[in-house]
Image: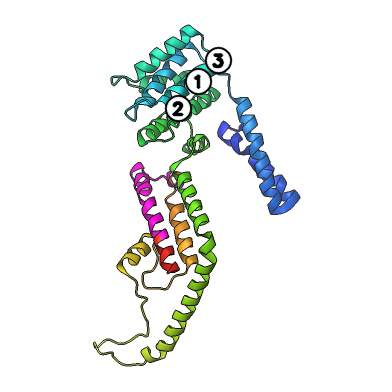
Amino acid sequence: MKPLGDNNRAWLGKATGAALGLLGGGPFGLVVGAIAGHMIDRVTERAALPSPKSLSTAQETAFFRIAGYMSKVDGRVSEAEIQAATKIMVAMSLSEARKQEAIRQFNFGKQTAYEYSPDVTSLQHALSASQKELMMSWFVGLSLADGKLVSEEKQLLHNIGAAFSLSRWRLAWMIQRNKPVSEWEQDSQHSNKYKRQQNSQQGRREQQGSQRDTKQRSEQNQQRPKNSQQGPSADGKKNTGQQKYRVTSQEARARQELRLDIHASISIGDIKKAYRRCMSELHPDKMMARGASETAIRAARDRIPKVREAYEFLLECRAK
């Protein structure tokens, strides 16, 4: 039987815990078992990683050159990235002489003339699978040290991950695990803050919206028999009995941003559902998992504020 790879082992505890939990406690047991399995996976994964001291001098040299290149790829090296590189030196337990050499190689990697591909190739052939996993976690942590992951850094991580035979799913998981407060989480915090601000008025809005919808449906029902009579209308077209819901041009644009029908009556629930659907479709990690291009992901990030603005505008319209 073929042994499990590192990527599959990362899910073994979760799958086993979820299965045992489902058998013992139903759906609730499944959730508890999956959480317990995840904790076991984390402990096992950390225990399986090799010691940072196991790298050779040549491997340290290649790593810090690439690290310097990665820190400068977005145009400047931040103080947070320098601190992250220093923490890696501490984890390696470098002597003072080796630390100075690591700094020299880090600065060498920042130079414009430096080409990282040969060093990646040398590490590809020299490192074991567990050493590649450890080094990749350092690269991910370094790229996220300044709190953001630019497209150049992400492309570099993908190139190194491919050379290290690391799947895109595994890399995406490592990025998500090491990511501090991402744009997506900031957007979620903004949404939660808005919900708290509107919580005191929510019940009254929903009640008013329900009453308004009932009144509109009643008016439409009263007009339908008159409009559904056979025969042409004044402009010569046959009247079908359908009545359009009129909105302002600004509300129409907001509805189009959330992909809502501009001719139909909508409730607060419809607006929230459309907002959640759009934000889920625009989630950077989900788009990357679907194989979206960098251009598409950047366009999605640019669209998120517009979707949020349309969502808040439509809620305000319902409150009036």
Which dot marks residue 88? 1
Q: Which amino acid does label 2 sit on?
A: Leu
Q: What residue type is labelled 1?
A: Ile
The quarter of the displayed image where residue 318 is located: bottom left
Vertical relation: 234 (above or below) 105:
below
Task: Find residue 230 and report its horizontal and vertical position in percent.
Answer: 35, 92
* Colour mapping: rainbow
Q: Where is residue 32 in the image (x, y as percent from the top left)?
A: 69, 46
219 above or below 112? below
Residue drawn at x 51%, y 36% is: 170
Q: In which quarter of the image is the C terminus?
A: bottom left
Instruction: Tell me where the magenta segment starts and ends, as one range.
Output: 286-312
Query: How crowded is the residue under tag 1: few (<14 C-alpha within 10 Å), some, or many (20+)?
Result: some
Please give the residue where the numbered disc 2 appears in the rendered image. 142
Q: Please identify, in this view, whether the residue under mark 1 or under mark 3 is nearer the observer.
A: 1
Which circle's residue, 2 or 3, is located before the other in the chain?
A: 3
Residue 275, x across and y down, in percent = 45, 58
Bin the neighbour count of mark 2 within 10 Å (Cα to Cα): few under 14, some 14-19, many 20 and up.
many
